[in-house]
Amino acid sequence: MSEALFHDVVRDRHSVRSFLPAPVPAALLRSVLEDAQRSPSNCNTQPWQVHIVSGAKRDALSQAILAADEAGRFTLDFSFDLEDFDGVYRQRARDQGAAYYQAIGVAREATQERRTAARYNLEFFGAPHVALLFMPKVGDSVRVAADIGMYAQTFLLALTAHGLGGIPQTMLGMYADTIREVLGIDPSSKMLFGISFGYPDRSAAANRYRIGKVPIEQSVTFHT
Ligand SMILES: Cc1cc2nc3c(=O)[nH]c(=O)nc-3n(C[C@H](O)[C@H](O)[C@H](O)COP(=O)(O)O)c2cc1C
């Protein structure tokens, strides 16, 4: 196994927010899914329930989510509120938002343009495919959600290694009921987030910026 290759794949991965319309060939998609399936999970329960949406269904799903958003029909299975984040976590989220909007040329005070940019989430950032990550409800859900996170990162790294890209999207989880209705998914399956994916449009401003990471000293405590 090449350590250098792994190093490159990890650093090459970034959130892709503009895609080319070309679909991913079925064999390539299968190979990415085979890689993601290798993910670890609590007691090997492998609780990920993955729905890949493409083609006409993808377009219909986007339309339904946009309509739900317009109607203010937000149906989250798990809460998410930036107000819940304090201190450095809040600041990092603010810095990320500011860096992204600056990269795509949207001013802080341009409320309508910001809304349009945010709603691009609901068009899957132009990606030809979206993977919607559902899970069974088990206890307080924290352990299963961690397993879904493991799966998601393996999926994202596999995309990168194959010249593809993706963007995890909590925002899609705000329309969980709408998504279940369009795809015929049982209400017992809970949605954590989605990953839009495909071939990155490498010329797009949204994909030319990179957000930094804090030094490991801010995340890791060494005990000896
Ligand atoms: C679980 C999860 C959900 C996310 N949800 C969204 C989202 O709804 N919309 C979005 O534009 N980015 C979303 N992101 C992307 C983050 O903003 C991004 O990962 C972070 O800024 C770090 O950038 P990087 O992925 O390029 O390293 C999400 C990331 C994760 C891990």
Image: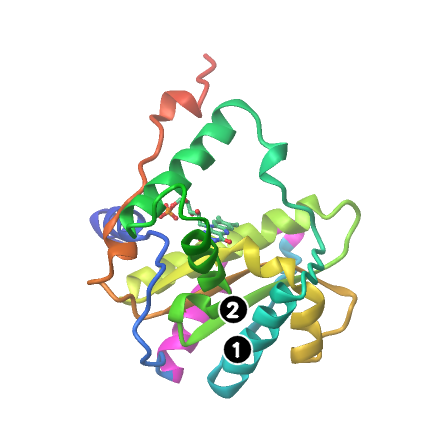
Q: How is the image coloured?
A: rainbow
Location of residue 191 with respect to 32 vertically, above or below: above
Left/right of residue 7 with respect to residue 114 in the rendered view: left
Foreground of the two, 143 or 134? 134
Q: Which residue: 29% across, 61% down?
A: 161
Residue 101: % across, % down: 35, 47
- Residue 185 placement, left or right of 147: right
Instruction: Give the farthest residue toward the top.
Output: 224
> Is residue 128 depicted above or below 84 in this figure?
below
SS assignment for the magenta stretch, majority: helix
Q: Which residue is mark 2?
A: 131
Residue nearest the observer in this picture, 63 or 34: 63
Residue 173 lies in quadrant: bottom right
Magenta region, residue range: 26-43
Label located before the other in sequence (2 or 1): 1
Residue 63 lies, in percent from the top left, at 56, 77
Kindly identify which residue carries mark 1.
53
Q: Is residue 29 magenta?
A: yes
